[in-house]
Image: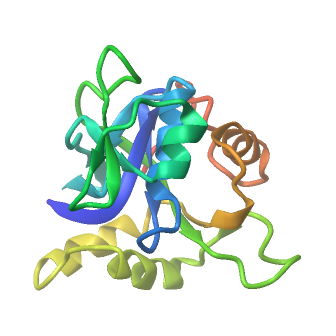
Amino acid sequence: LICLHASAVQIGEHVIALLGDSGVGKSSLAASLVALGFPLVTDDILPLEIVDDSCLAQPGFAQIKLSDVIVRQLGLPESYVADLGKHVQIVDEDWGSFASGPAPLLAVYILHRARCETSCATIEDLAPSDRFVELLRDSFCQGPGIDRLATLTKCPVKLLPADRVFDAGTFITEVSAAPRQPTLQVDKNVTVW
């Protein structure tokens, strides 16, 4: 088992992982996707099971931690937890849906704050040689787990400017339309690594 510092949602029969530094918007984007009807897989820690050359994303807890701003934007009831400084939103029949079991990982998106105005404004493919470093940075791997993490570099890994994501609908549209991107309208022809 490999654990990544990530939020994840299920798109069709597959999972996309959202990685990045604390506060960059992983949970906010995941909550926006849940509000659009995509099931939450996990928030904060994503367990991944490597089986042969494939990777299964395991569901975590049916809750998500959100800032005041996102709670207000999504019109959620306030459920403030003082020691976390965040609202804890339970995913249940009252709001959202939760993944029913493990599902294959389709892609990893690393949210980052863009440092430029033009070239950083698009979703970019990470070169295979750069994937390992980025995945290691957002993992809880040590010792033998690092070898298993190398298997993850076969998965598409993309850089996503966090300050460009205005809403989840925009993200889904851009990811679906971008050249060489795996489609998020998953069908039987999608190859999952």
Q: Residue at image x 25%, y 24%?
A: 100
- Quarter residue 21 falls in: bottom left
Task: State the residue in front, 162 or 189.
Answer: 162
Give the image's coloring scheme.
Answer: rainbow
Picture layout, residue 74 above or below residue 2? above
Q: Residue at image x 32%, y 60%?
A: 85
Camera sees residue 191: no
Where is residue 174 shown, x and y percent of the image? 75, 47
Q: Is residue 118 left or right of residue 189?
A: right
Task: State the residue in front, 2 or 30.
Answer: 30
Q: Is residue 6 left or right of residue 134?
A: left
Q: Is residue 87 left or right of residue 183?
A: left
Q: Residue furthest top?
A: 93
Camera sees residue 47: yes
Picture layout, residue 168 above or below residue 129? above
Q: Is residue 28 left or right of residue 99?
A: right
Please state, as top left, top right, bottom left or bottom right, where the N terminus lies in the image: bottom left
Where is residue 33 shown, x and y percent of the image? 54, 36
Where is residue 114 shown, x and y percent of the image? 70, 77
Picture layout, residue 57 above or below residue 186? below
Q: Residue at image x 22%, y 70%?
A: 148
Where is residue 154 shown, x and y percent of the image? 44, 65
Q: Residue furthest right?
A: 118
* Count of numbered circles on the image: 0
Q: Residue at image x 37%, y 23%?
A: 97
